[in-house]
Amino acid sequence: MTKSEALFERACKVIPGGVNSPVRAFGSVGGTPRMIASADGSHMTDEDGNTYLDFVGSWGPMILGHNHPAVREAVIKACEKGLSYGAATAREVEMAELICSAIPNLDMVRMVNSGTEAVMSAIRAARGYTGRDKIVKFMGCYHGHSDALLVQAGSGVMTAGIPDSAGVPAGCTKDTLSAIYNDAASVEQLFEQFPEEIAAVIVEPVGANMGVVPPQPGFLEALRSLCTRYGAVLIFDEVITGFRLSFAGAQGYYGIDADLVTYGKIIGAGMPVGAYGGRREIMQKVAPAGPVYQAGTLSGNPVAMAAGLAQLRVLRDDPQFYERLNAKGDWFFGEIRKIVADSGVKAQVNSCGSLGCIFFTGTPVHNYETAKTSDTRQYAAYFRYMLAHGIYLAPAQFEAMFLSATHTREELSGALETIRGFCSEQQA
Ligand code: KE4
């Protein structure tokens, strides 16, 4: 028995499914989750000493690679001054100023402790600002696990094939309307049906929780125009795309101004941090400035702020960072496309900058329904093959590969050869 197997056996006795987040359980790919002991740069090492080239990067935060010196030193230094005060600090002012400086239409921001909390709070702010109850989300998009958003969600919900979570009262989702990603007409129909009842449309500007599904030309622009026309709040859920596609996230990358935006992952650099923010007239509704209540014991935690500030400052102060990272992604996922095409394996490779994934289907994937045509058994075989060759992928088809600044061309070329090997085996 390996150390990971022994630890997972123990975990299953005291943690539901043996994990603290479902997608980690290897449920859809088989085998025992690797118990990770350490990580550095582009690699992670498990309790049995096996080292893997990591394409999960903690699901997005590790854009600079694991254990970046600037982040590590900032955290150690912050810890020496105490872990949490439950009071205002200079560092959270610096953090808010830095985030607001990144995006022109981001006037104010509130720190929270996760992406789920950021989205839940942004929805509440939009409802408080508009006085309306209904929200529109897209099938296959995942916005964390707050009740109202567990409707045809992506990520672990989609992987587990749970249409909607148990334990969510109908009353919590009765105002949640589902639309089709990349189909603005499906949103317009909802606005025509409920012209004065929709508080917000929330969208992942690049779908990354049904696998990677970029917006088709005009889709985000149409959402912007519909929300403006009907007086609804456009919320970009940038928990994944924020500070990933550009320093101004998807708003900067696509040139679209959302009314509210949510963040997580990268802004915490691996520490538990989320944030939501946007136009002043909306954010001024949030307590204690306004009547929309939201709070958190560890919100703006000084150690977490130190980690996030250190990472964001590295990203801000390197003018070519995103050009390099996105070019690396374009090259890498472009090479995978060539390998797949040459091999004859029925697969689609979707990507956007440093985000990408392989869907094992002959159908181009542009929304939830087409993503679901993917052969998840073949994905499981792909995952196990890559893991056996020292490459750690998301243990689920409906997730993304995340490249970091530390993935070298040589490492990526090695990964490409492994993918070539898998495709050859599939066709043998
Ligand atoms: P967290 O509460 O997990 O910090 O963030 C929720 C969330 C919100 N919005 C988007 C677009 C997200 O991708 C997420 C969380 N992402 C998943 C990965 N697909 C987290 C991994 C997990 O659930 O273990």
Image: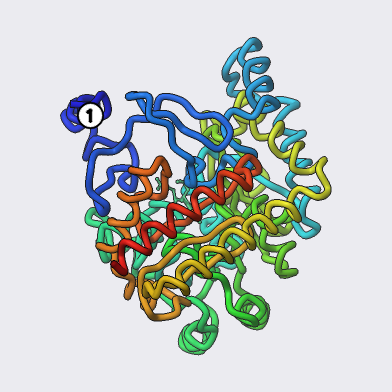
Could you say which quadrant of the image residue 223 lies in? bottom right
Quarter containing the C terminus: bottom left
Of residues 16 and 187, the one nearer the viewer is 16
Horizontal and vertical percent position of residue 308: 65, 34
SS category of the residue bearing label 1 = helix
Above or below for 132 versus 230: above
Residue 134 showing in the rendered view? no
Point 67% across, 65% down: residue: 258
Above or below for 261 versus 202: above
Q: Residues within 10 Å of mark 1 (few under 14, many from 20)?
A: some
Horizontal and vertical percent position of residue 407: 60, 43
Horizontal and vertical percent position of residue 340: 45, 69
**Taking 272 as reference, is 224 left or right?**
right
Above or below for 217 versus 116: below
Residue picked out by circle 1: 11
Could you say which quadrant of the image residue 95 lies in? top right
**Taking 170 as reference, is 272 left or right?**
right
Above or below for 99 versus 147: above
Of residues 350 and 209, the one nearer the viewer is 350
Q: Identify which amino acid the numbered label 1 is placed on.
A: Ala
**Taking 254 as reference, is 318 left or right?**
right
Of residues 30 and 391, the one nearer the viewer is 391
Task: Identify the image's colour scheme: rainbow, by chain, secondary structure or one colour.
Answer: rainbow
Horizontal and vertical percent position of residue 366: 47, 77
Residue 404 showing in the rendered view? yes
Q: Residue furthest top?
A: 80
Q: Residue furthest front?
A: 428
Quarter containing the N terminus: top left
